[in-house]
Amino acid sequence: MIASAVTQIISNLADQIRIYEHLLGLTRMQAEALARRDAQGVHAILQEIEIGMLERGKCEFRRAQLLDQAARVIGVAPDEVTATKLAQLAGLQLGQQLMSAAAHLKHVMSELDTVVSRNKATLEFELAIVDHVVQAMTVTNEPLAGYGRSGTEVERPRMRILDAQV
């Protein structure tokens, strides 16, 4: 009975690895598009990432179901089910497959986190540049209107761009 549960968990881990490797590939493509400053490419890849995230959610839900099932089989609470515990109970071959798949998934997730962090930093930098340029373009040189209630100078009025005040 435990062998069947572990086999299903290994299959689910393989699905998770496939999904996370796909997301990793997309995220690397997004980094390349960011480096090229290809806004349309970044947007298109982001849409593919969103689809991958939906698939990931379904796979994670299935994993939770499988862990609940395994918990019932071995007689523990679901949050007490670990890969190590299942590997010990499943026998040498299945245990090794489970631990190998779990380690591979952790590795892929770690790589994905690294690339996502780099992309986030790049996007934040680009947005800071855009913010600086917009600020520089929209501040007027008109004299200040006066002082505010607290005695501080009132902020310079903003210019209108395309009939919208920014």
Image (spheres, helix red, strand yellow):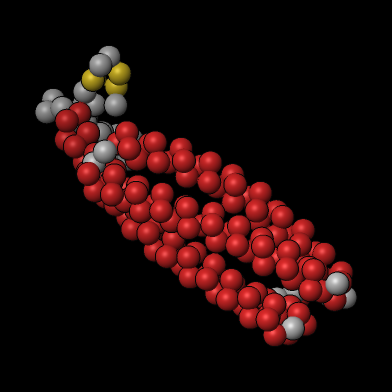
Image coordinates of residue 80 in percent, x first then y, are: 76, 75
Image coordinates of residue 17 in percent, x first then y, are: 55, 61
| Most foreground residue, 7 or 74 | 7
Say which residue appears at 23% left-offset and 20% top-offset.
161
Residue 60 showing in the rendered view:
yes
| Residue found at the far top of this picture | 163
Using residue 26 as the reference point, say whether residue 131 is left or right of it: left
| Most foreground residue, 126 or 28 | 28
Using residue 100 as the reference point, say whether residue 91 is left or right of it: right
Using residue 32 as the reference point, say whether residue 6 is left or right of it: right
Image coordinates of residue 114 in percent, x first then y, are: 39, 63
With respect to residue 9, does 99 lie above or below?
below
In the picture, the quarter occupied by the C terminus is: top left
Say which residue appears at 76% left-offset and 80% top-offset.
90
With respect to residue 55, does 147 lie above or below?
above
Say which residue appears at 75% left-offset and 74% top-offset.
81
